[in-house]
Image: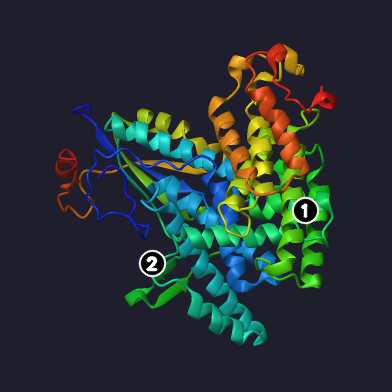
Amino acid sequence: MARADSAAPTADAPGATPTLPPLQLVEHFFRHETGRLHGALIRLVGIHNLALAEDVAQEALLRALRTWSMGGVPANPSAWITRVAMNLARDAFRHQRMATTKEPAIVTHFEQTLPTSAAVADNNTEIRDDALRLMFICSHPSIAPDAQVVLALKVLCGFSTGEIARAFLSSEAAIEKQFTRTKQRIQAANLPFDIPEGEDLGPRLDGVLAAIYFLFNEGYKASAGDRLLREELCQEAIRLASLLVAHPAGDTPRSHALLALMLLTSARFSSRIDEDGDLLRLDDQDRSKWDQSLIERGLLHLVAAAQGHELTAYHVQAGIAACHCTAAAAASTDWGPDSAPLR
Amino acid sequence: METNAAPYMLLFRNSGPENYQYLSPEQRQQLMARWNTWYDDLSAQGKAIEGQPLELERRLVSGIGGERIVDGPFAEAKEAIGGYVKLMVSGLEEATEIAQRHPALEYGLQIEVRELTHACHLGVQHHTSSQLSAV
């Protein structure tokens, strides 16, 4: 046997073919699983138990690290980690019930909704919905914009306090303090963990888009902080917007416009800094370094953004970014007939 | 595999979750990947035979007839064996060098290196090595 992984629930029987290459996790798996677990756990235990959800997700990730380091990655790592997290959450609730006897109703509800044995949620719709609910929580108007970004990075994107502090050139203590205040505010405000409907949806969606845009800009500002981490903030903003447009509630022209804007802008990432780390003006950038696959994705979303009659700031900025991206050289940029003031 | 290779055990201590709680998710994933690479390289060379984590839950049995049973977890969690890897290598030196390359040492991991004897002290003939050669 190449590697014993009998501790994993989905592992093959002992004696499995030793010639199979060892399983590797996709990039950022632990980080994104943290966000996914938060969504699934909060749906079960309620947003007022955010701290419990965090503790449980953390513990599940640590157990995965320990077991997978020594035993190898299981065939379905997401299912493995979900099952561990659900068991931990159930134990925590049983313990709480014995300690306080106050939440028996929740425990009953919780045990009814627990995924049964092997059929652990690998349900993409559910994951997407949980992520969207979390986005609406993170961008709630009762939370200040900078606190929204920290909350989203921590809860939704699985960044550690240390990483957020490095990205923002802040101290871990300051980020932790702000995060604690935000959590208290969420608990006090009793925010609903759902996707807004009807006439609530429009303004709340604007809030989500604004928060994603803010997150992207925080990453795009190359002035300060860990550059690699800041680029990852931009990637996270794109990931969240991609989840958003894949959901009927978020599939609006302005969501596509924002996503197009971010894709087209990040396509130029690798060319905007010279060998000395100084910023290069657009005219001086090596356009062959621009990421064509990101440009193509961006242009596709720009087409989707043109459906309907909406024209938002995201549309205009994405349009300008597209002019740059489709020009072979700065001098041949097609500004279009109505864009004289933009030059 | 060298013909004169002998079985060794690497016993991992101080490998509990608390050692890694302050790492970011990215650092945890990187550590895990390095750990698996360490093992996979040894396995590809035929030097690592098997390895497995041990569950955290423990029970100590002692006394005549096993009358004393102590449930874990214990205060001295750092002393607990968290997992093992079985090697087939030329000797204690090589086993030790392999242990020295372990990526989790910088996070407090302790590795005990022990040779497996070919016969146990009760005189019962040990037959693991013939099975191992078929692996």
- Residue type at mark 2 is Ala
Residue at x-position 68% and y-position 40%:
A233
Give the image quarter of residue B28. top right
Q: Which residue is mark 1?
A: A148
- Residue A340: x, y in percent? 82, 24
Residue at x-position 82% and y-position 54%:
A178
- Residue B43: x, y in percent? 31, 35
- Residue A39: x, y in percent? 60, 61
User: From the viewer's perspective, is B92 left or right of B22?
Assistant: left
Q: Is residue A122 above or below residue B39?
A: below
Q: Is residue A25 above or below residue B93?
A: below
Q: Which mark is residue A119?
A: 2
State the SS at label 1.
Answer: helix
- Residue type at mark 1 is Gln
Q: Quadrant of the N terminus of chain A?
A: top left
Considering only order in the chain, which callout, 2 or 1, is on the residue closer to the N terminus? 2
Q: Nearer the viewer, residue A87 or A198?
A: A198
Q: Nearer the viewer, residue B135 or A64?
A: A64
Give the image quarter of residue A216. top right
State the SS at label 2.
Answer: loop
Q: Is residue A260 above or below residue A227?
A: below
Q: Residues within 10 Å of mark 2 (few under 14, many from 20)?
A: few
Q: Is residue A29 above or below residue A54?
A: above
